[in-house]
Amino acid sequence: MAGQVSSNYRHRRKTARFITLTKVPGALLKVYALEEAGLPVTMEMEDLALRHVARVAPEMFRDDCGFLIIHRCGQHFHFAIINTWRGDNEVWEAVHHIDRGMTDFAPFPPAYQASGALRSTFCVWEMGITAHEAKAWSRYLMTARDAAALATWQSDVFNGEV
């Protein structure tokens, strides 16, 4: 049953690092770097991802709260995984990427297959951040959802090994 795992695959540890809380048109996002030892998400890549999200914000967000994962995958490839809370308790996702030779992030084509087909969502490392954020949002939903509760949600961040 584990035939989908290549015999030469070697899993490694990665670290989630909270970067900042950012407000873009229509959204308040917690921003995370997901990186492995020796291959950090650079400040330049953080800035590029934040500028990209701010640029796409008007067409994407509608008074949302959520989180952005900037995931470094090897030397040059990065994901910008944009997640917002909608439908009261659902996470909605947009996957963007950048690779060598690209000047900006763009939608990641394999994430947008035909309707009804299985598609990739989060890898095990991204799930570490997503699991924390799901619990944080659930804690927020159990409150009066006032300004104090929102401030608590904003400060409820994750740092650590995933």
Image (cartoon, helix red, strand yellow):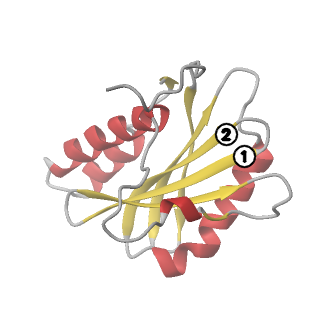
- Residue 30: give x, y in percent of width and height: 48, 49
Q: Identify which amino acid the numbered label 1 is placed on.
A: Phe
Q: Residues within 10 Å of mark 2 (few under 14, many from 20)?
A: many
Q: Residue at x 59, y 54 (%)?
A: 80
Q: Cβ–Cβ below 8 Å for labels 2 and 1?
A: yes
Q: Identify which amino acid the numbered label 2 is placed on.
A: Arg
Q: Which mark is residue 123?
A: none
Q: Which mark is residue 72?
A: 2
Q: Residues within 10 Å of mark 1 (few under 14, many from 20)?
A: few
Mark sitting earlier along the chain (2/1): 2
- Residue 55: give x, y in percent of width and height: 64, 74
Indicate left or right for 92 with 58 as reference: left
- Determine which residue is flagged by label 1: 77
The foreground one among 47 and 155 is 47
Q: Is residue 55 above or below residue 67?
A: below
- Residue 4: give x, y in percent of width and height: 44, 32
Residue 57 makes an appearance in the image: yes
Identify the secondary structure beneath mark 2: strand
Give the quadrant of residue 50: bottom right
Residue 157 makes an appearance in the image: no
